[in-house]
Image: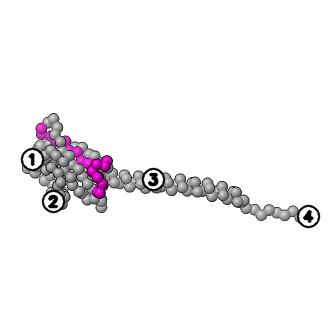
Amino acid sequence: MPRIKKPGGFTLIEILIALTVFAITASALISGLTRHVSQAALLRDKIIAHWVAENEISQIRNPASELSHRSRNRAGSKGGSKLNEVRHFPSIGTNYKEVTMGDMEWQVRISVSATQNKDIRRVSVDVYPAGTDNDDISLVTLDGFAGRF
């Protein structure tokens, strides 16, 4: 009696095991890519927020600059901190403003406080994405000092 040859191929169990391994690997890869994309977006936002904070401190140190003048004319002040253009010395208080940078809107809180030296003020700039409550944690907090010079 002639022997019947089995056709070559995979069994159903082997195919199911291969598909399971592929599904687990694909879901892990997609999860990693999603995490990478969200971290890249957060890093981009933090970098732009840091630039906003640096610009604000620079404008406080040099309020006569053209950039500072344009920014103050565009953004309305809601707080008590005003810059003394003659002496380049900020008064103590808190100022809120909105800034556009990187095609994004940012909320900025500028807090000016006294130091032990009456001719130096501490400036703390907190930057938030627009539409967030200022009680939320800021993306960036940058501290600097401004002197009466």
Where is residue 15? Give x, y as percent. 67, 59
Q: Of label 3 and label 1, which has the lower sequence position?
A: 3
Q: Which residue type carries mark 3?
A: Arg
Tell me which label, 2 or 1, sits earlier in the chain: 2
Q: How is the image coloured?
A: one colour
Q: Which corner quadrant holds the N terminus?
A: bottom right
Snapshot quadrant of residue 37: bottom left
Q: Is tag 1's residue or tag 4's residue first in the polypeptide sequence?
A: 4
Q: Are marks 3 and 2 in contact (CB under 8 Å)?
A: no
Q: CA distance from mark 4 to mark 2?
A: 100 Å
Q: Which mark is residue 87?
A: 1
The stretch in magenta equals 118-137
Say which amino acid is labelled 4: Met
Frontmost residue, 6 versus 130: 130
Estimate the spatial distance between the alpha carbons at disc 4 and disc 3, rounded to whole Å. Answer: 63 Å
Q: CA distance from mark 2 to mark 1?
A: 19 Å
Q: Quadrant of residue 48?
A: bottom left
Tell whether 10 sits left or right of 37.
right
In whole angstroms, how far apart are the C-alphas of marks 1 and 4? Answer: 111 Å
Secondary structure category for the residue under label 3: helix
Determine if residue 57 is in view.
Answer: no
In which quadrant will I find the C terminus? top left
- Gap in angstroms between the C-alphas marked 3 and 2: 40 Å
Q: Residue at x 50, y 54 (%)?
A: 31
